[in-house]
Image: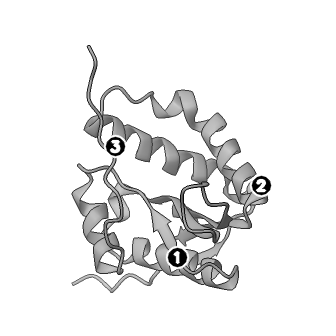
Amino acid sequence: MSAPQSPPQIVPYRHGEHAAGLRACFVELQEYERALEPAMPPGERVADEYLARMLERCREWDGAVFVAIDDGAVAGFVSVWAQVPPEPDEPDRPYAFVSDVVVLERLRGRGIGRALLAAAERHARAGGAAVLRLDVMVGNAGARRLYEDEGFVPRRVEMAKPLR
């Protein structure tokens, strides 16, 4: 019988220390999403630009990135923006948005995603947000279950129709 695994530590992202692990998590996520929607670009090709934009939005919208550290390495991350300006046709109050939640596949099922979401929610509350939003691909059943278990409810459904 193996010893129970200790939960990972959730810490604020530190560029020099966590950048490679953050990138690896994003690439794995992008490849998973490509399996659900093959038209998406390869993770290796878009990782650097995507992560730079994600971090820029953190600076603009009172955001933060938290990483899960397991056995000294990045096991996952969450990016949350606490003060997203509303669109003109939405309620006139900023909201918080979880742009990404990633847990490396080999480490899923250990509560890491829940711990990352809890860190995002704490950051959003501290930033004064009244609502926390996120989006998820329809085919990502595991993530959808996690989000529903954590109290997220569907708000909108984005639909697409191929024109070819």
- Position of residue 137 relative to residue 115, above or below, is above
Question: Is 59 left, or right, of 134 in this rendering?
Answer: right
- Determine whether the residue tagged by mark 2 lies in a helix, strand or loop: helix
Of the residues under marks 1 and 2, which one precedes in the sequence? 2
Q: In the image, residue 130 lies at what x, y percent?
A: 57, 81
Residue 76 in view here: yes
Q: Is residue 67 visible?
A: no
* Residue 50 position (above or below residue 13): above
Residue under label 2, please give it. Answer: 16
Query: What kind of element bears circle 1?
Result: loop
Location of residue 31 in the rendering, given as x and y in whole percent from the top left corner = 38, 38
* Marks 1 and 2, how far apart at CA: 32 Å
Using the image, determine if residue 59 lies above or below residue 115.
above
Q: Quadrant of the N terminus?
A: bottom left
Q: Position of residue 102 (x, y in %)?
A: 45, 58
Distance in Å between CA atoms under marks 1 and 3: 28 Å
Q: CA distance from mark 2 to mark 3?
A: 26 Å
* Residue 7 occupies quadrant: bottom left
Residue bearing mark 1: 131
Q: In the rendered structure, which disc, 2 or 3, sits on the residue that comes first in sequence?
A: 2
Count neighbours of disc 3 (C-alpha within 10 A) and say few if under 14, some if 14 to 19, many if 20 or more.
some
- Name the residue at 38% across, 81% down: 5
User: Mark 1: which amino acid?
Assistant: Val
Amino acid type of disc 2? Gly
Q: Position of residue 139 (x, y in %)?
A: 23, 49
By what rule are the colours in the image chosen? one colour
Classify 10 Å Cα crowding around label 1: few (below 14), some (14-19), many (20 and above): some
Q: Closer to the N terminus: mark 1 or mark 3? A: 3
Q: Which mark is residue 32?
A: 3
Of 142 and 72, the residue lying toward us: 142
